[in-house]
Image (tube, rainbow, N blue to C red):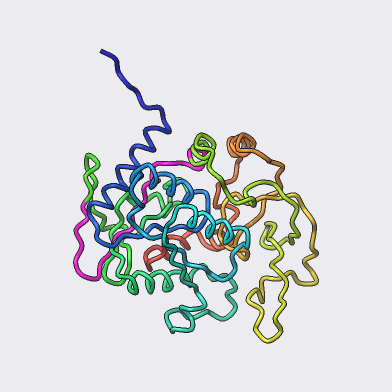
């Protein structure tokens, strides 16, 4: 009698596929959060393995801050088209115009404004579940969350009142107006993600690899210089995020390790051109993945506060 043993990546893949199929079986109107980043790229491959040859039974949803890398938007749109999926995009600008989000004076980053934009999209399309690519190794607040993360009628998360998940049994019951966030990659690490991308030979946005880019130093990290402002009839969307006279621009060979928007994503000086290079660089790294995110560095409690308010 032969036995079959799953290796580490196969076990993680099997677990994530099981979670995705649970979502499809338990919820009426789920959505998959797809930004084009490495974690959501893995989610797309897992969805293919969970549901093919049938169509992926949920639309893709992305909330734009308006400060995205052009390379990321191009990749997101092309990948959704390749899969024949419905891509729903909602923006912070639209949320501001509708009165759902209010910018705070002096705050340049729009990451916090994604929360009301996301909650507005959930309400607009009556989504009862959103699948996200968060992992427990990313950040302290992420580590507190379970596979099925219950959100109340206001979209809020209470870390002290989470549902038990014994023997991989998930409680998906919801009342009207409540919703669930589900994280199939909860037990994955950054290394697992890149090992899986390498194993599956998945395409990723070019900014994950080393390239030349104009950067400037702010807050102890290199930030990318935003695109030029070309329409004088409209306000500069990157106002406040451009380098000042005291922040000289340097042309560097850099890449992103984790992607937010151009205002929050710190670039790392690096010379990697393959998946093997990335894996080796991560193995030697002494800084956490989100250590290059300006919005997370602002406060250790920043992520948990945002998640309690309804963030991804």
Q: Residue at x 32, y 63 (%)?
A: 157
Counting the numbered discs, the total is: 0
Near-viewer residue (154 or 304): 154
Near-viewer residue (232 or 293): 232
Near-viewer residue (222 or 11): 11
Q: Quadrant of residue 9?
A: top left
* Region rendered in magenta: 171-192
* Magenta highlight on residue 186: yes
Q: Residue at x 37, y 65 (%)?
A: 308
- Report whether 312 appears left or right of 18: right
Given the current orientation, which residue lies at the most extreme bottom position? 233
x and y, in percent, of residue 42 in the image:
46, 46
**Vertical placement of 189 versus 55: above or below?**
above
- Could you tell me which quadrant the C terminus lies in? bottom left
- Report whether 166 appears left or right of 263: left
**Vertical placement of 243 versus 77: above or below?**
below
x and y, in percent, of residue 172 in the image:
22, 55
Q: Quadrant of residue 213?
A: bottom right
Given the current orientation, which residue lies at the most extreme top position? 1
x and y, in percent, of residue 259 in the image:
57, 56
- Could you tell me which quadrant the N terminus lies in? top left
**Vertical placement of 252 versus 10: above or below?**
below
Q: Residue at x 62, y 62 (%)?
A: 69
């Amino acid at each position: 009698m032969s036995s079959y043993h799953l290796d580490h990546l196969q076990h993680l893949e099997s677990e994530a596929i099981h979670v995705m199929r649970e979502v499809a079986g338990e919820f009426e109107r789920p959505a998959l959060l797809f930004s084009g980043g490495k974690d959501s790229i893995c989610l797309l491959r897992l969805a293919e393995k969970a549901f093919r040859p049938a169509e992926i039974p949920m639309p893709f949803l992305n909330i734009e801050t308006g400060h995205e890398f052009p390379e990321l938007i191009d990749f997101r749109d092309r990948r959704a088209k390749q899969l024949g999926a419905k891509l729903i995009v909602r923006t912070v600008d639209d949320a501001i115009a509708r009165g759902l989000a209010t910018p705070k004076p002096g705050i340049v980053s729009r990451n916090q404004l994604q929360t009301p934009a996301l909650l507005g999209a959930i309400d607009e399309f009556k989504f009862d579940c959103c699948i996200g690519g968060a992992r427990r190794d990313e950040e302290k607040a992420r580590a507190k969350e379970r596979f099925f993360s219950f959100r109340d009628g206001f979209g809020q998360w209470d870390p002290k009142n989470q549902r038990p998940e014994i023997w991989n049994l998930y409680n998906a019951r919801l009342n009207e107006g409540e919703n669930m966030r589900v994280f199939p990659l909860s037990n994955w690490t950054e290394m697992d993600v890149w090992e899986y991308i390498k194993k599956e030979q998945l395409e990723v946005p070019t900014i994950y690899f080393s390239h030349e880019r104009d950067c400037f130093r702010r807050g102890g990290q290199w930030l990318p210089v935003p695109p030029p402002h070309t329409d004088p009839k409209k306000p500069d969307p990157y106002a406040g995020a451009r380098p000042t006279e005291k922040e000289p621009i340097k042309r560097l060979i850099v890449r992103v390790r984790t992607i937010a928007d151009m205002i929050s994503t710190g670039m790392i000086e690096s010379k990697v051109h393959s998946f093997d290079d990335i894996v080796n660089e991560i193995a030697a790294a002494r800084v956490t993945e989100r250590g290059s995110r300006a919005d997370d560095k602002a406060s250790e409690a920043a992520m948990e506060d945002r998640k309690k308010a309804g963030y991804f």
